[in-house]
Amino acid sequence: MVSPMQPPTDALAPPHLLNWSSVARTRWQRLIEQARALYHHPERQQTVGRGKSLGLLFFNPSLRTRTSLEVAAARLGAQVSTLQPGRGTWDMSWAQGAVMDGAAAEHVEDAIAVLGQYYDALGVRLFASGTDLEADRTDARMQQIAQASPVPIINLESAWYHPCQALADAATITDHFDGSPAGRRVVVTWAYHPKALPMAVPNSALLAAARLGCEVTVARPASHALHASVMEEARQSAAHHGATVRETSDLGAAMEGAEIVYAKSWGGLQRYTDPAREAAQREAHRDWIISSERMARTRNGQFMHCLPVRRNVVVEDAVLDGPASLHLRQAGYRLSAQQALLHELWTP
Amino acid sequence: MVSPMQPPTDALAPPHLLNWSSVARTRWQRLIEQARALYHHPERQQTVGRGKSLGLLFFNPSLRTRTSLEVAAARLGAQVSTLQPGRGTWDMSWAQGAVMDGAAAEHVEDAIAVLGQYYDALGVRLFASGTDLEADRTDARMQQIAQASPVPIINLESAWYHPCQALADAATITDHFDGSPAGRRVVVTWAYHPKALPMAVPNSALLAAARLGCEVTVARPASHALHASVMEEARQSAAHHGATVRETSDLGAAMEGAEIVYAKSWGGLQRYTDPAREAAQREAHRDWIISSERMARTRNGQFMHCLPVRRNVVVEDAVLDGPASLHLRQAGYRLSAQQALLHELWTP
Amino acid sequence: MVSPMQPPTDALAPPHLLNWSSVARTRWQRLIEQARALYHHPERQQTVGRGKSLGLLFFNPSLRTRTSLEVAAARLGAQVSTLQPGRGTWDMSWAQGAVMDGAAAEHVEDAIAVLGQYYDALGVRLFASGTDLEADRTDARMQQIAQASPVPIINLESAWYHPCQALADAATITDHFDGSPAGRRVVVTWAYHPKALPMAVPNSALLAAARLGCEVTVARPASHALHASVMEEARQSAAHHGATVRETSDLGAAMEGAEIVYAKSWGGLQRYTDPAREAAQREAHRDWIISSERMARTRNGQFMHCLPVRRNVVVEDAVLDGPASLHLRQAGYRLSAQQALLHELWTP
């Protein structure tokens, strides 16, 4: 259902990057290695973007994604336009066949068709609705954009996936384990947060760790399980390396022996049917915070988080500011990973 | 009254592009041909903008204009700053001699005088007031900006004109008729819209078609005639080619034999004196929509619209998504036309 | 207490530019001369910024600072990202050790640490709180940012200083006096304004004039004295040239013989303890406006203002539009001064 990054040999469709699900392992591996090379040698000169333009559409806020892409494109020689639809541009309609006599002045498919004539690729951020599970799970709006676009669409966090974050995470983990992440113990853990956040990051982090062949444990309250389809895809992916994906609601047990602790909050699936109940379930787990005490039970475990992070809510200051946190390296890898991605996209 | 694009030989005033009214036909023709050349050969390398900067001031929303200019300037090697006055900059005062003790922190003429020291040209979007006909008809605020600016001002849609759109439209029409648009039948038609929109686009589209020597019919309800001064200028311009400009309130008759159907909604001139009556008149013409049925009466007529367009209000999906619509080519020409314009402006 | 621009030999800290207080005179002088050279020869090609990126964070509005920096960086070949925190990015927390369960999604120190991995320098605008004198006087938030940043921070107007404006002002004054500003008579005068504005500009203008060795008079109502620490630093700086800094509440007397009249409004220090009283004191001095009549008492005095300026509130139209105003040259110097600054920063 979900459209993969098309193989470059498919001349009919642009090579969108909507998620990594159908991307060949060799290609995923090559991009990780290119990101690592750029991270360690940022002075490397690349000019493949000269004369090219990248359009960025942020339907939601961004700090890292926007800035790291602007710099990544500049390092390749490309020009970037950053747009926030509805702020200085027209409000957009998404409905098919609708009579557009409301607030929206332009249909999103028309906007994308036009921008696709100006830019050599379009990056799009479009968070989950949080109210329509089927639309979110199938990334319906990102799919709609991809189908309307004559040029490659790069998903900058959709309802269900955050592939740029996933590539940076995979490169960070690979780097930390000196190039051999397979078999290492990674915990992807839920943390408390005052809002019911989207699931794109935990989905993508879990899938990335599984694709690296790590032994993954997903720790979350029983009320906040990830979607069964994502768990199943992760299990199959890990199995390719003989690795496994476990699930537990015992955070303490999950931390024992962990080598990576990837923390993230997300709203439970119950939010789609009974938001008040989801909020109550979430509030009941305010103690799900990554503390120094919990980190002490790991095996030299390194903390990871995609940022922005709420200090002393998701993680204690002592962990984030201590020697066992990879969150800044992870953020730094956003730049290198996206530079590698654009470089591959634009290499003839 | 309205200041034309100054001839390049006038050393005292920058060569503003506020409208095409006084631009020599040879120059207009040359820009159309350059736009066409760039449209068909976007790979052509141009470097005349290197070391130059373009400032864009959007007092109103924009998608196409902003992005196509950012890319056009980049293709010439120039840097672009895009500003939205009042969003992250200071609110501006326009009054002459006023005591500025209200909300506005800066006079627009001071801002323009300063920006004119940083940029090699300034693009300005500034929509009609919709309440002061004389100010709108004379483009008073755009004139004020032009007079304050030490560098060329490019009108990115003012109260009365949209010359960048007009150039792209003219190139699109010329392209469609293989370089020979004179004598072809163009209908510029009003369409229903829930808001009383400005007249800059219909004014400019009508004048562009007339300047191409097309046989033009303006179709609109009797309540929504264009301003007599614009009609008169169009008639004189068409007469240069022996062509005519007609006016009708019978949309069906206008469609018979049309080769181009350029649709656009606008508020009637009554809006300036009796907005409620204008709204009532507009609502009475909800059936002014470009339908497949109406397009079937044309002579292989092609649909045009400047975008953004409200689907199934101004035009039916079937027309826009069918084979007889030029709206995307038209949008694509925004980039080429503006690149041609900047190229000419910056060529020593 | 206030961190100076670190000498380039200090390998541990980036060479932040937070203010000029501890910058060596030779360096200050060299930057002024480089700014003058660029102002008079803008065609000079500089390429030291190629491959570099500059991030700009505007927590407050900007017109001149933003645009002149975007163009200055482009002239050096560098890429610029301009961000407005909270507008399309995350709201930020500034507290140390706080439990971040409120509106702020990200801690400012985390954001700066991340951006410092992408950009080669960060410019930051962050106005005074107007409510916490100690925090404003020590530039506490700008200091916090500087300490969190792995790359140079350029102050684009903080609570207490506006060093980029000061450098442009110093170059403008030096230019006006043909390279010999020492001993010339400069009046820095308060003017009425409907709001209690910050003191960064008057502080920086006073210190710049003193550092040039000018004979400076600060004219202001008794209720609106500058802070004693700033006056004292200015006195010591002027004394280095055998010059003096005087203070008066008699604007008429101050104008006698003045060669530069640098006008600016600011809120009195009383605003920190009794805002209503400060407002009443300010309203009592609505006659503090720079008029033609007052300028006539100077010795060919030139008007200066950092802009934006409220016409006919701070200064009469006749002064601003007359031959004896340097405000546009001053604004033009923002570009050259910042280009000189970035050039020095990025020269290996």
Image (cartoon, coloured by chain):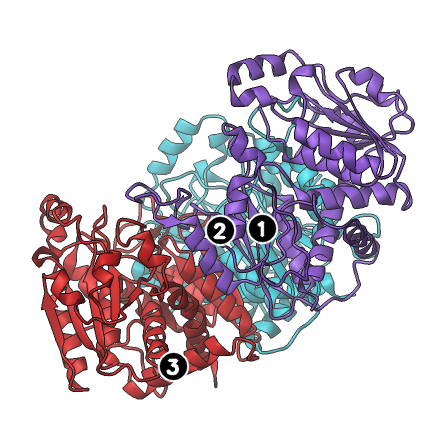
Chain colours: A red, B cyan, C purple
Q: Which badge, 2 or 1, is on the more N-terminal residue?
A: 2
Please tell me whether mark 3 or mark 2 is closer to you in this view. Answer: 3
Q: Which mark is residue B62?
A: 2
Instruction: Please report the residue visible at 44 percent of the width from the left and 51 percent of the height from the top.
Output: C109
How dense is the environment of label 2, judged by Cα within 10 Å: few (below 14), some, or many (20 and up)? some
Q: Position of residue A124 (x, y in %)?
A: 37, 63
Report the chain holding disc 1. B
The answer to which image quadrant residue B322 occupies is bottom left
- Amino acid beneath label 3: Leu
Kind of residue sitting beneath label 1: Leu
Q: Quadrant of the C terminus of chain B?
A: bottom right
Residue topped by disc 3: A31
Residues A158 and A191: in front is A191
Residue B156 image label: 1
* Residue C201 image point, x, y percent: 67, 35
Q: The residue tagged with tag 3: helix, strand or loop? A: helix
Compared to residue C225, the image places residue A295 above or below, namely: below
Q: Secondary structure at mark 1?
A: loop
User: Secondary structure under badge 2?
Assistant: loop
Q: Chain of mark 2?
A: B
Tell me the chain of label 3.
A
- Kindly identify the residue that appears in the image at 53 percent across and 23 percent down: C272
Relative to C40, say whether B34 is above or below: below
Disc 3 crowd, CA 10 A, few/some/many (<14, 14-19, 20+): many
Residue C126 position (above or below residue A10): above
